[in-house]
Amino acid sequence: MTAQTHLTLHTLGKDPEQHAAWDAFVDACSVGSFFHLTGWLRVIEKVYGHTPHYLYAKDGDAIVGVLPLVEQKSLLFGHALISTPFCMEGGVASDDEAVMLFLEEQAMQLADKLGVDYLEMRYPFARNNPKLIEKCAHSTFACELAADDDAILAGIKKKQRAVVRHSLKNDLQYRVDQDATTAYDVYSESVRNLGTPVFPKHYFQALVDEFGERCDVLTVEHNRQAVSSVLSFYYKGKVMPFYGGGLHAARALKSNDFMYYRLMCDAKAKRDCTVFDFGRSKNDSGAYNYKRTWGMEPTPLHYQFYLVNADELPNLSPNNPKYQLFIKAWQKLPLWLSRLMGPFLSKYLG
């Protein structure tokens, strides 16, 4: 174990070589995730204008831990330091407990200095830092990908497997490319129907531009019209459908079920992925229950908080009763208006 006295703290700047060294460390680290990569810094800074505070620790000349942090400041939603907004995972990436404690301490000192309401670190695993408060309000879902299309279908839970088989008879076609425009168009209508503000359109294109072949879009069409679409990421043998949705016709066509099944098959056959990572959902939400129908069991996410000026943990969940009137009103907005207004709110809701 590295002694903390040997560690030095550094802040990631603009130097491309620094960014490359950070990403190389994330690639090699056992708990380094796609969401620790520096591409998120560039996307979030470019699209949303939030201030990054990317900290890393070195032992001598070697990077031994990284901690991506982003500062968000809003009159409506408060002042927070988050690792990492718009991502389901964050926190310190390191294979050394002493390094993790060192960088967590540095993050708390930075949170105090900035005078934020709270610090949030989105760990997928439990931590043992007594200064942090744990909140497990989300879970993730994942499964191993079988050898071929038939085996993947056979591995889906019986009732959901019947739904997928039904979808295969509905004259649906799919394509895989980097069509961020279609992904946004479908997603924005889908989340409007759920009463949720949508991200800006150029965010989707920025993700595709930044992550290149680690990102693509699978779109399902019926009668040459897009009905479902999902933007996915690929990293360390995982396929991660991240922003997906369907239009009104998707329910009857079962096109979302078709979409996720085809994504599993395509990721296995063309990218040799071994894991389908269905991402996070709020516990006991509709998305949470839907993912369980595929036969995947929830794994809790252990988000850690450090309160500075806040008196209690944040609760920006749509399940919060105080947001119910807003959600119902948003669902009634014209689509064009929801796309216009959504980005002013969603930049603080990632």
Image: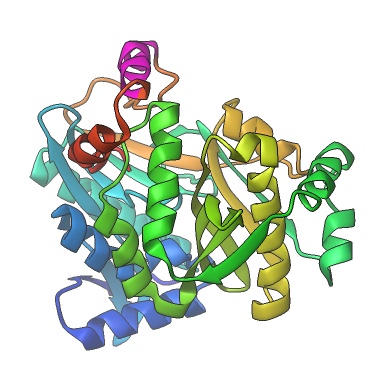
Note whether 237 is above or below 133 in the view shown: below
Q: Is residue 138 left or right of residue 158?
A: left
Give the residue displayed 72% in from the left and 72% down from the top: 268
Q: How many marks?
A: 0
Let me know if residue 4 appears in the view: no
Note whether 234 is above or below 129 in the view shown: below
Q: Is residue 116 left or right of residue 95?
A: left
Task: From the top left corner, tell me how far across and down residue 105 is, in percent.
Answer: 28, 52
Dominant secondary structure of the residues highlighted in magenta in the image: helix
| Quadrant in which the C terminus appears | top left
- Near-viewer residue (301 or 100): 301
Note whether 84 is above or below 31 in the view shown: above
Task: From the top left corner, tell me how far across and down residue 235 is, in percent.
Answer: 53, 71
Task: From the top left corner, tell me how far across and down residue 17 is, in percent.
Answer: 24, 88
Give the residue displayed 37% in from the left and 78% down from the top: 23
Note whether 55 is above or below 337 in the view shown: below
Give the residue displayed 45% in from the left and 34% down from the top: 134
Give the residue displayed 69% in from the left and 42% down from the top: 254
- Near-viewer residue (182 or 92): 182
**What segment carries the magenta color?**
321-330
**Image quadrant of residue 224?**
bottom right
Let me know if residue 202 appears in the view: yes
